[in-house]
Amino acid sequence: MTILTTGRIFDIMKYSIHDGPGIRTTVFFKGCPLNCWWCHNPESQAMGQEIMLWEDKCIGCGDCLKTCPYGAIVNVDGAQLTVRENCRLCGECKKVCHAGARVVVGEKVTVVEVMKEIEKDIVFYEESGGGVTFSGGEPLMQPGFLNALLENCREKEIHTAVDTTGLAKSDDLLRIASKTDLFLYDLKLMDPEEHRKYTGVSNKQILANLRALSQSHGNIVVRIPVIPGVNDNRENILSTGEFVSGLSGVREINLLPYHKAGIHKYQRLAKTYSLPETKPPANETMDELAEELKRVSYKMIKIGG
C-alpha cells in the first residue's frame, strides 16, 4: 500500500468550480519545470519551501527580526524584510508572527493527510458530479506521490482530474492515465522558439506527450491560456487548433482569458512579474479567437474553464 508516500504541496482549495466538472477539491503540487511569464501561482515554481511576506499584514512589531537565528530579517524603513540568501526556512519567524504576515509555502504531507481533506467533501462530489483535481505547479514532477493519490481516489470511487503542463517523462504520464478520469492539458504556444522564450523550455516533449496520451485516453481537455501580445495571434490559434484536431482523445478545447489574480504574489516572494502592463483580453477578442478555432477544429470550443 502506498498511503505512506509523501509529497510537497502548497495549497488545497475547497469548492473549486474551474478545475473540472462539478464541485471539486484542488490539490496544488509544489514544483514546475516551466517558468511562464504570466504564471499566477509563482509559489508553485520552486520545488522547495519558500517564505511569503504579506507586507500589508505586518504590524512592525519586530519579533521576527529578534527571533531569526540566521540574521535573515532586517528592518528597512519600518518594514521587516527578508534577506533570502540568508534564510534557512526554519519557520521561527512564522511562529512569532502574530499578524500572520509570514508564511512558509510548501508543506510536506502524506497521502493519508491529503486523502483526509479530500474525503471531507465526498458528499459535494456526489451531488454535483465533482471530484478532486491535482494541479500545481506540475503534479508529474512528483509521480510517485501523484500515483498513490490517484490509486486511493480510485478505491474511494472519487472522480479524478490531472491538470498538467505536459512536460514530464512519457512513462510517468502514461502510467497514471488508466487511473485518471480527466486530463486538463495546457498548450501555450506552438512555435518552439516562442514557447522557449515565454516558458523557458521547449514544447517538443509537451506535444509528443499529448499525441501519446490521446492514443490511450479519451477524455482530454486542452486548455489554452490567452495572453495578449504573447499567444493571442491568429497564427498560433490556428496552428494549435489544427494540431489538436488530429488527436482522437481530445474532446474539448478551452480558451482561458489571461488575468492578474496572482500578480501580488510576486511581491510577497520578492520576485519580478514579467507582464506588468498586460491587460486581460476583451470579450470580443475571446469570441473572435473561438470562431477562428472553429474554422480548423471539430472539437467543442469553450471560453473559460
Image (spheres, grey):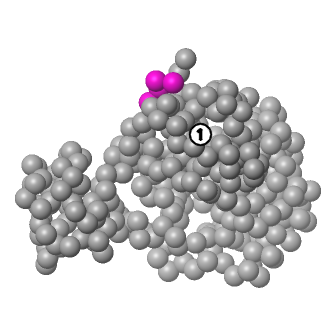
Where residue 103 appears, x then y in whole percent? 31, 56
Secondary element type, mark 1: helix
- Tell me which corner region of the image, top left, top right, bottom left or bottom right, holds residue 193: bottom right
Q: Quadrant of the C terminus?
A: bottom right
Q: Nearer the viewer, residue 147 or 213?
A: 147
Where residue 34 appears, x then y in whole percent? 51, 50
Q: Is residue 110 left or right of residue 72?
A: right
Q: Residue at x 29, y 71 (%)?
A: 57
Residue bearing the label numbered 1? 119
Residue 5 in magenta stretch: yes
The residue segment tinted magenta is 3-7
Q: Nearer the viewer, residue 263 or 192?
A: 263
User: Which amino acid type corresponds to the residue marked 1 in the rendered image?
Assistant: Glu
Where residue 70 appears, x then y in whole percent? 10, 49
State the predominant SS element of the stretch in magenta: loop
Q: How many marks?
A: 1
Residue 285 in magenta stretch: no
Q: Residue at x 65, y 51 (%)?
A: 24
Q: Is residue 205 above or below residue 273?
A: above
Q: Residue at x 66, y 78 (%)?
A: 281
